[in-house]
Structures are given as C-alpha cells and as structure tokens.
Image (cartoon, rainbow, N blue to C red):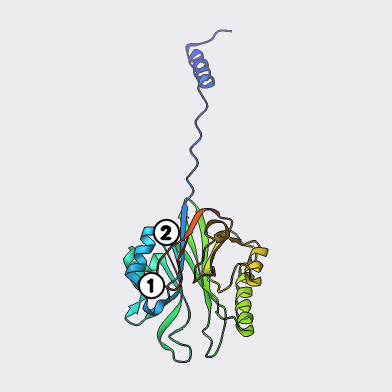
C-alpha cells in the first residue's frame, strides 16, 4: 500500500500522541478553612473594640455571638463589623430574641444572637424558640448559609438557651433545645454554636449527641467556658475539626471557644 506524505504526517502525529505522557491531573482544590469563634459577650457593657481584637488575634473567619445588643445609638453588631472591616450587609446577621434590658423593664432596642463572617452570607433566618408574653426572656436561634467559594457552602447557627437550675427552668430549656433539634432533622453539613446552659453530662447535651451532633469541645477544647463549667458549645455535622481552644479573657463572664475545621 502506497503511503502519501500526508499519510506519513498523520501516522507520525498518532505515534507522538501515543508516546506522550498522560496529562497531569489538576491539583485538588484546597478546602476552605473555617475558623469558628463562639462567645457569649454579655452585651450590656461589652467593649466591642477589645472583643474585635480577640477575634482578630484568634484568626476567626466565622464569629457567633450571644447576648449582643442593637440599641438606638449603640448597635453592637455594626460596631463589631466596622472594627473587623466586614460589610454589615454582606457579612453579618442579627437574630433578635427579645427586647434589650430586663423582660419586666424592657429598654429600647433588641438583644439576641449574631453571626458575622468574612465569607459572604447568602441566606439568613431567625427561628423563635419561645413566645412568652412578658418574662422570662424570649429565646431565638440565628442562622446563615455561607458561600465558602469554589461551590462550597455551609450553614451556621447560634443560640442561647434559658438559664436556671429549677425544674421549671430545666423544662423550659429542654423545650427550646427540642425545637432546635426538630428544626434541623438530620441535615448536614452544619455548625451549631451557643450558650446552652447545660453541662456535657446533662440529658440535654446527650440528646444532641444521640442525633448525630459532634461536640467538638469534648475532644479539642474540654475546658470550662463559664466559671468552672463547660456550657458553651460548637457542635458540627459533616465538618472535619482539626483543632480548638478556649481563650483566656475577662472581657465577659464567658470565655470564647475557637474551632478550626474544613468542609
């Protein structure tokens, strides 16, 4: 069979392609780091500039706060966003729980929970957990969906359950925790933080673990967060936590928890 010049060229290209090494696979995209700081800041007299410094020094890019206030002329969410250089609209969400001040003597403004992040917030929600006409203080849960980039997203929620050791207080807190668990079902990936006012050994805490929530503090930061008790938590589902710590500061009666994780 006669092979033309063009035929030789085609055969040569085929042989070159066969001899060439296989194309290198693209390097896997690095997983977005998520550094969560959760803190009950005791909002009444919180020093937001000092709190912002603790957050910056921790390296946190997701911040969940309880007992934070938005009062006329004293918006702590705005103050913190400004201190951190994060946009109030794109990077912050406040979920009101009740009026500021004592429930039997309310003051102007709202108190509740907040989530701030260097990642863009693409969805916000506030879930009421109680509906008392006056006292005790009503509770809620704030939640966001964060865009981590590269098509990766994660939902972050924070709450503050009612305090107290009386039978009525425990029953009230258990009811709020049940609403939290029912809201999520078995969805994943999720991060749930907050002041739960319950020890790890309490039935309330065990019920969260029994439905698949990982108490990251039990492995990575098993230290007191309020006095001598560990009652503040960072729970996760579908996240990999690599390290964590409880920070030593006297800016609040609670100590902040920092957890480092990836999606």
- Name the residue: 52% across, 59% down: 221
Q: Residues within 10 Å of mark 2 (few under 14, many from 20)?
A: many
Q: Is residue 13 left or right of residue 84?
A: right
Mark 2 or mark 1, earlier in chain: 2
User: Where in the figure is residue 55, as x and y percent of width and height?
Assistant: 39, 62
Residue designated by label 1: 77
User: Where in the figure is residue 63, as x and y percent of width and height?
Assistant: 44, 64
Alpha carbon of mark 2 to alpha carbon of mark 1: how far? 16 Å
Q: Residues within 10 Å of mark 1 (few under 14, many from 20)?
A: many
**Quadrant (top left/top right/bottom left/bottom right) for the N terminus:** top right
| Residue 33 seen | yes
- Please tell me which residue lies in front, 242 or 153: 242
User: Where in the figure is residue 53, as x and y percent of width and height?
Assistant: 34, 63
Q: Quadrant of residue 78?
A: bottom left
Q: Is residue 164 left or right of residue 92?
A: right
Residue designated by label 2: 60
Q: Pointers 2 and 1 in contact (CB under 8 A)?
A: no
Q: Quadrant of residue 44?
A: bottom left
- Name the residue: 49% across, 31% down: 24
Residue found at the far top of this picture: 2
User: Where in the figure is residue 9, as x and y percent of width and height?
Assistant: 48, 15
């Amino acid at each position: 069979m006669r092979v033309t010049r063009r035929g030789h060229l085609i055969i040569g290209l085929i042989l070159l392609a066969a001899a060439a090494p296989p194309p290198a696979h693209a390097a896997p995209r690095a997983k977005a780091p998520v550094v969560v700081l959760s803190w009950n800041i005791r909002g009444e007299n919180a020093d937001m500039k000092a709190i912002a410094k603790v957050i910056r020094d921790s390296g946190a890019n997701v911040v969940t706060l309880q007992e934070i206030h938005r009062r006329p002329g004293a918006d702590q969410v705005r103050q913190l966003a400004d201190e951190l250089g994060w946009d109030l609209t794109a990077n912050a969400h406040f979920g009101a729980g009740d009026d500021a001040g004592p429930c039997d003597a309310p003051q102007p403004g709202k108190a509740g929970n907040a989530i701030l992040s260097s990642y863009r917030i693409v969805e916000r929600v506030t879930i009421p957990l109680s509906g008392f006409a006056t006292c005790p203080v009503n509770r809620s849960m704030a939640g966001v969906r964060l865009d981590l980039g590269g098509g990766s997203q994660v939902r972050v929620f924070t709450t503050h359950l009612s305090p107290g050791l009386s039978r009525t207080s425990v029953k009230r807190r258990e009811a709020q925790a049940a609403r939290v668990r029912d809201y999520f079902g078995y969805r994943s990936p999720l991060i749930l933080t907050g002041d739960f006012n319950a020890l790890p050994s309490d039935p309330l805490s065990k019920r969260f673990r029994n439905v698949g929530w990982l108490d990251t503090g039990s492995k990575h930061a098993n230290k007191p967060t309020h006095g001598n008790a560990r009652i503040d938590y960072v729970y996760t589902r579908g996240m990999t936590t690599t390290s964590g710590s409880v920070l030593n500061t006297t800016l609040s009666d609670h100590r902040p928890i920092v957890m480092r994780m990836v999606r």
